[in-house]
Each structure stands twice: as C-alpha cells, then as structure tokens.
Image: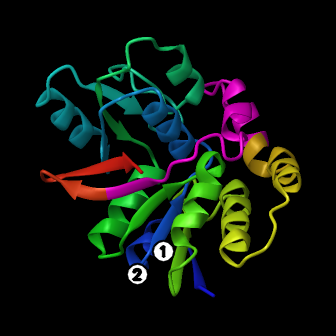
C-alpha cells in the first residue's frame, strides 16, 4: 500500500518528491482536461503571465489561456474556464499556453523541485490519476489552493478521494460532489463576477475523462500530456 503525504500551495509543491499529483479542481486542472479532450495538440504550462505571453508569441497560432485574480486577462484568448473551452470550435490541432494563479504555478514548482512523475489532477480525472499512482510505494498529493498558501476545500476533497482509491477503498463519488458543492470553494466561485456558474457543474463531473495529465519538460517547455 502506498504511503501518502499531503502538501499544500507553492511551498508544498516545491517540497514534493517522487510520484506527485498536484490538485486544482476549481478550475485549472478541470480546464486542462477539457482542453486536452477537445483535441489540442500541445498544452504548455507557465508560472507567470509575461512568460505565457512570450512563449505564445514564439509559437505559430498558439492560444493564451488562464487568469489573474480569477479574471481572464484582456489579451488572453481563453479564461480558466471549462465552459469557455466547450464553447470554442477552433481548438483541434492548436497549441495552448496556460497560466493560472495556483495550479500551473504549483505544477511548475513540483517539476522544478525534482518530483516525478507529476500529474495535474482534478475531480474530472480523479480515478485515472489514482490508478496511475496506485502501485507507487510513496505518493505526494498537493492541494494548490487559490492563494497558493492555504488549501481550498475542493482540492482537499479531491485529494481525499484520490487517496482513498489509492488505498483500495470504494469511492463515494456522490458524497464528494455534495461536499464540494456545499463548500466554501463553490460559494467563492458563485460570488465572483468573473466566473461562469456553469464551470462549477463541469468541474464536478467526476471521472469525466479516463486519461491522466502528466507534466514534464519537453523541448525546454513545461508540457502537460494526456496518457
């Protein structure tokens, strides 16, 4: 049985070692799952907004995706939003460069700190992520948290679900969804003028996708790839 360590935020991500899942359910790693399912050919994660802009400008026909303070920057093509992804018809074959306030930064910190393999996780890919980690002797689960210092309840619930599956327990998906829907994270999203309420439902689609999202450096860029 795997020994599971729990961490939170940028500091926790930087301290992660071995096989690691960085969790951001609301909304970064739900959005990435919907992007990868939409047929994009490359998804690059960045730590900073200017870094994302620079990389996107160096690539042909790349799209910028993400947020700063929950809001899509004016020059970005997509916000950090599954709803926006589902509304686009021009995604197949495109490269997307993504930056968010917590999730992409925590993945970057985990990879830079030497953890590996590093998976981006959310409820949308919880089961697949747990299966990828199930045979590992040690596992680190990092809750990103919006302030990248304090974990959010939706990430903690997702971590509990993944840890339970890794530990051989039968998951109670309905209970997890109910807990997240009643939690502070959902209330925070509903109160934001920048966030589409439909994102909540899309983020709560447990095991919507059957792939894992592995982060690794490819051609000098932090790339998220489905397996």
Q: Does 201 appear in magenta?
A: yes
From which residue to which does the magenta span run? Answer: 187-215
Q: Is residue 6 visible?
A: yes
Is residue 220 toward the left or the right of residue 184 in the image?
left
Label 1 sits on a secondary structure element that is: helix
Determine the image quadrant of residue 81. Answer: top right
Q: Does 57 appear in magenta?
A: no
Q: Is residue 46 above or below residue 78?
A: below
Q: Residues within 10 Å of mark 2 (few under 14, many from 20)?
A: many
Q: Nearer the viewer, mark 1 or mark 2?
A: 2
Q: Residues within 10 Å of mark 1 (few under 14, many from 20)?
A: many
Q: Could you give the CA–CA distance between mark 1 and mark 2, rounded to whole angstroms?
A: 10 Å
Task: Say which quadrant the N terminus sits in.
Answer: bottom right
Q: Which residue is mark 1?
A: 12
Q: Is residue 183 above or below residue 136?
A: above
Q: Which residue is rendered at x = 71% and y = 46% of the image?
A: 206
Numbered mark located on residue 132 in the image: none
Residue 106 position in % (x across, y down) = 42, 60
């Amino acid at each position: 049985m795997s020994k599971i360590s729990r961490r939170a935020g940028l500091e926790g991500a930087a301290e992660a070692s071995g096989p690691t899942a960085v969790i951001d359910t609301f909304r970064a790693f739900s959005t990435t799952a919907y992007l990868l399912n939409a047929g994009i050919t490359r998804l690059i994660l960045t730590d900073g907004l200017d870094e994302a802009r620079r990389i996107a400008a160096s690539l042909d026909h790349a799209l910028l995706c993400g947020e700063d303070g929950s809001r899509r920057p004016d020059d970005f093509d997509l916000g950090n939003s599954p709803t926006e992804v589902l509304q686009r018809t021009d995604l197949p074959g495109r490269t997307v460069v993504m930056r968010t306030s917590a999730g992409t930064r925590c993945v970057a910190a985990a990879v830079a700190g030497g953890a590996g393999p590093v998976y981006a996780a959310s409820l949308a890919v919880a089961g697949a992520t747990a299966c990828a980690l199930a045979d590992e002797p040690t596992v680190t689960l990092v809750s990103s948290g919006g302030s990248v210092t304090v974990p959010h309840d939706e990430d903690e619930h997702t971590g509990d679900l993944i840890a339970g599956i890794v530990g051989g327990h039968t998951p109670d998906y309905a209970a997890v969804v109910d807990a997240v829907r009643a939690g502070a994270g959902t209330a925070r999203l509903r109160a934001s003028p920048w966030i589409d309420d439909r994102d909540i439902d899309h983020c709560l689609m447990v095991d919507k996708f059957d792939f894992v999202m592995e982060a690794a450096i490819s051609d000098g860029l932090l790339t998220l790839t489905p397996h």
